[in-house]
Amino acid sequence: MLARIASLYPARLIFRKRDFSSEIFISRLSYYTTDKELSDAFSAFGTIKSARIIRDPRTNRPKGFGFVNYATELEAQKAVKAMDGRIFRGRLIFVEIAKRKPPCEGG
């Protein structure tokens, strides 16, 4: 049976490790949330390396989303499981593993 499956699918697809990240993306944040509040809210799930709210470069106003970077992937997964779909500072937030930005093509 395994030989038949191996013949149908290349080995790189069968044994491909899922690419997890230790960084999470948080959307729908209150525009009044600070970096410290974000860090404090997510510190219960592990050691935080960084927490940042993304701001508009021209006006310096928060855009309503941010990133938290954990020391390990397991801590990030725990935070996603616990905080996704929760109310934070009066807003329903969504939390997911951050997607890696694809490399720029050309110049």
Image (cartoon, rainbow, N blue to C red):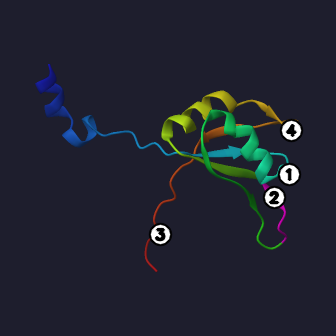
Q: Callout 1: 10 Å neighbours few (<14), some, many (20+)?
A: some
Tag 2 near tag 1, CB within 8 Å: yes
Q: Position of residue 93 (x, y in %)?
A: 75, 37
Q: Which mark is residue 71?
A: none
- The Cα–Cα distance between marks 1 and 3, rounded to whole angstroms, is 30 Å
Residue 28: within the magenta?
Answer: no
Task: Check the image and name the residue furthest to the front.
Answer: 47
Give the mark nearer the N terminus: 3 vs 2: 2
- Label 4, on which residue? 89
- Label 1, on which residue? 31
Residue 61: within the magenta?
Answer: yes
Task: Check the image and name the residue furthest to the left.
Answer: 3
Q: Position of residue 37 (x, y in %)?
A: 80, 46
Q: Position of residue 44 (x, y in %)?
A: 68, 34
Judged from the image, the secondary structure of the residue bearing numbered disc 1 is: loop
Judged from the image, the secondary structure of the residue bearing numbered disc 4 is: loop
- Label 3, on which residue? 104
Give the mark nearer the N terminus: 1 vs 3: 1
The residue at the point 60 percent across, 37 percent down is 46
Name the kind of residue labelled 3 in the image.
Cys
- The magenta stretch is 59-63
